[in-house]
Image (cartoon, grey):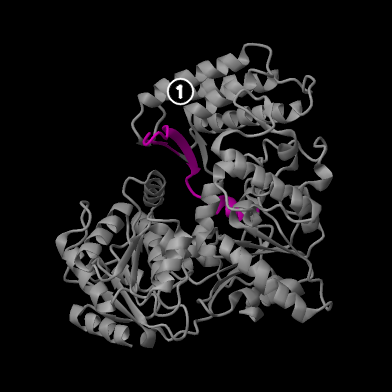
């Protein structure tokens, strides 16, 4: 892999590398990246991998290399990930935009602790990063941080010389290697907001996550209370009636949302279109009414900047939604549990912007344990902006972007270490959740394994139902369900006691690393197709059909294959692990698309015999 990465960095051809868990892929791209003549960015999807790179892999490499090459490196995150010294020292704007110095109520003690930590970080030349802060909630962190719209900027802030975010940028400017995340990469390269110093090449680890993160970074939201808050904050700074007009536009949008059905909005109704236009125009007028300089008062600039930033955000989002572009998907989320209804707008596809704004100018190395879906790289390559016809093209010419795809294999012998069991005898899953035969199957498998089970479910309701039944029928085992406690706490409990089951949904499919006898059975209740009412996925599927492709295979089956591969990957994490992946959805064995999904999984020994699997699990449990 290191040789291939080095070659790609040299000849400028893009590279897709499938590298299984345990292959040491981070070292295989870090060594060529450090040897490369120009700056390289490494982008990850998760904080866990970022920590592994920065705290373990890179320091060990730097120590080994010594001063033979430029081994300088820096971590770069979005501004909201750093404490803001101006907000800490000058106060936080209240609902009216006035600055308040000390928080009140139950949050006060925690916020004061965070402030003290940030000041100590500043004294000790620390990074001021959220990940290093004392334990806190999102709401508490917002009291000591700002987003990019609220920031006063390096030229106006009196604390710019000490600013953690500015220091991180300066360090990145001096570094050969920059470690960042997919979202920041997307904002810099695709949204065109300069966040990362100039670089020659990018290594994208956990690349199976990239299109989802780019979509997320390019998705905007708008709710009535966002507009009302922006209107209230503006009152103090705007002398004319424009702040009031913005509040009135919020009322018009509230009425339009009330008259709109939740779900995808394929054509703007006259009422919704007019309301969004009204909000856009009112926000534009309000922005132009802000004074150029804050009218007196220490710290006044921060309140004004925050208020103006909120109005700017309302303007940008309302403008995009009112445009109702064919390249965007607009939908309305239903209000529930005191969360107001929100409008969302997301790009119909992201491969075009990725191709034009990232792959045309840079060399990209994409790597992950799951890049080959259905047995080849095409599905993932297309989603990233590369064309199957460009594979192994001799060189860049015109608009051709050559790429290579390699699978470096795995240190694991899946045929010997793992069984894939498909419960062919069960009924296909329905819309009403788990039925008796599925719950019986779950209990029999868990009982045979003596716990040691990670249950991956398509919905929170299914996970909770299964947990309830297993607790009732197998009281001698400990059964945990996602939501019983914070995920790190549940994972710790799961690892410490082998006679434990952990049942949950999507965040367990990808983020959990539990090697050893803790996890000998991975249960998957159904093939994880996107929900039929998912506005973005259904729009993408229809667009693929309209373009003459197979929308189901290109969108739904590809999405399911990726998640199945990630879920099955929870089982074998070391060369000594053994176990069973049990899929309780017979369609994996009976449907035409089943072979595509199975070809996306590790090459496990496969069976549909429940008795054989129970015996295998029992032997492992006795083990």
Image quarter of residue 308: top right
Q: Is residue 602 left or right of residue 137?
A: left
Residue 341, above or below 546: above
- Say if the magenta span includes residue 476: no
Instruction: Specify few, some or many for label 1: CA neighbours under 10 Å numbering under 14, 14-19, or 20 or more.
Output: many
Instruction: Residue under label 1, please give it.
Output: 253
- The span picked out in magenta is 330-357
x, y percent for residue 284: 63, 23
Write the residue at 66% across / 11% down.
240
x, y percent for residue 91: 70, 33
Write the residue at 63% across / 72% down.
394
x, y percent for residue 502: 35, 65
Q: Residue furthest top?
A: 240
Q: Is residue 35 visible?
A: yes
Q: Looking at this view, is 78 or 188 the one in front? A: 78
Image quarter of residue 430: bottom left
Write the residue at 41% across / 32% down.
341
Q: Looking at this view, is 590 or 317 the one in front? A: 317
Name the quadrant of the N terminus: bottom right
Q: Is residue 481 left or right of residue 279?
A: left
- Say if the magenta span includes residue 344: yes
Residue 272, above or below 262: above
Q: Is residue 570 visible?
A: no
Q: Is residue 54 left or right of residue 447?
A: right
Write the residue at 83% across / 37% down.
158
What is the count of numbered marks? 1
Disc 1 secondary structure class: helix
Residue 338, above or below 571: above
x, y percent for residue 536: 42, 46
Q: Is residue 525 left or right of residue 74?
A: left
């Amino acid at each position: 892999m290191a040789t291939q990465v080095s070659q790609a960095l040299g000849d400028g051809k893009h590279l897709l590398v499938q590298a299984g868990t345990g292959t040491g892929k981070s070292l295989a791209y870090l060594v060529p990246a450090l040897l490369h003549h120009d700056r390289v960015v490494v982008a990850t999807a998760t904080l866990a991998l970022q920590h592994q790179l920065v705290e373990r892999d890179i320091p060990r490499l730097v120590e080994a290399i010594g001063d033979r090459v430029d081994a300088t490196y820096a971590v770069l995150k979005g501004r909201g990930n750093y404490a803001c010294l101006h907000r800490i020292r000058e106060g936080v704007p209240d609902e009216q935009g006035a600055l308040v110095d000390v928080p009140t109520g139950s949050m006060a003690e925690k916020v004061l602790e965070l402030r003290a930590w940030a000041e100590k970080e500043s004294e000790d030349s620390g990074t001021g990063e959220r990940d290093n802060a004392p334990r806190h909630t999102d709401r508490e962190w917002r009291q000591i941080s700002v987003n990019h719209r609220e920031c006063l900027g390096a030229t106006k802030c009196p604390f710019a010389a000490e600013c953690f975010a500015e220091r991180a940028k300066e360090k990145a400017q001096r570094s050969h290697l920059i470690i960042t995340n997919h979202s920041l990469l997307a904002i810099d390269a695709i949204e065109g907001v300069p966040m990362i110093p100039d670089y020659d090449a990018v290594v994208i680890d956990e690349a199976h996550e990239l299109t989802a993160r780019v979509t997320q970074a390019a998705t905007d939201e708008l709710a009535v209370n966002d507009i009302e808050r922006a209107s209230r904050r503006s009152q103090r700074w705007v002398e004319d009636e424009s702040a009031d007009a913005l509040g009135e536009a919020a009322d018009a949008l509230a009425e339009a949302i009330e008259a709109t059905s939740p779900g995808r909005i394929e054509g703007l109704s006259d009422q919704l279109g007019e309301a969004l236009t009204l909000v856009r125009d009112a926000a534009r007028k309000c922005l132009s009414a802000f004074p150029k300089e804050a009218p007196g008062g220490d710290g006044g600039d921060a309140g004004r900047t925050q208020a103006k930033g909120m109005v700017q955000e309302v303007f940008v989002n309302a403008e995009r939604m009112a445009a109702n572009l064919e390249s965007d998907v607009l939908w309305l989320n239903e209000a529930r549990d005191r969360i107001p209804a929100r409008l969302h707008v997301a790009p119909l596809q992201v491969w075009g912007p990725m191709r034009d704004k990232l792959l045309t100018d840079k060399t990209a190395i994409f790597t992950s344990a799951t890049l080959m879906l259905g047995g080849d790289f095409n599905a993932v390559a297309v989603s990233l902006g590369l064309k199957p016809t460009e594979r192994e093209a001799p060189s860049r010419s015109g608009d051709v972007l050559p790429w290579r795809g390699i699978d470096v294999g795995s240190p694991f012998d899946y045929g010997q270490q793992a069984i894939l069991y498909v419960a062919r005898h069960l009924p296909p899953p329905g819309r009403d959740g788990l039925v008796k035969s599925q719950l019986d199957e779950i209990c029999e498998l868990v009982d045979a394994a003596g716990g040691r089970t990670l249950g991956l479910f398509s919905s929170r309701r299914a996970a909770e139902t299964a947990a309830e039944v297993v607790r009732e029928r197998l009281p001698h085992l400990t059964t945990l369900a996602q939501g019983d406690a914070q995920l790190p706490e549940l994972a710790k409990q799961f690892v410490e006691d082998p006679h434990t089951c952990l049942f949950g949904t999507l965040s367990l499919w990808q983020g959990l690393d539990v090697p050893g006898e803790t996890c000998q059975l991975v249960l998957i209740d159904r093939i994880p197709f996107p929900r039929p009412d998912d506005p973005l996925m259904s729009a993408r599927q229809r667009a693929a059909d309209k373009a003459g492709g197979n929308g189901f295979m290109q969108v739904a089956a590809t999405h399911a294959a990726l998640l199945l591969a990630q879920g099955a990957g929870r089982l074998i994490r070391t060369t000594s692990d053994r176990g069973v992946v049990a899929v309780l959805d017979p369609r994996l064995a009976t449907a035409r698309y089943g072979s595509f999904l199975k070809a996306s999984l590790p090459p496990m020994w496969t069976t549909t015999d429940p008795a054989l699997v129970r015996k295998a699990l029992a032997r492992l449990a006795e083990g």
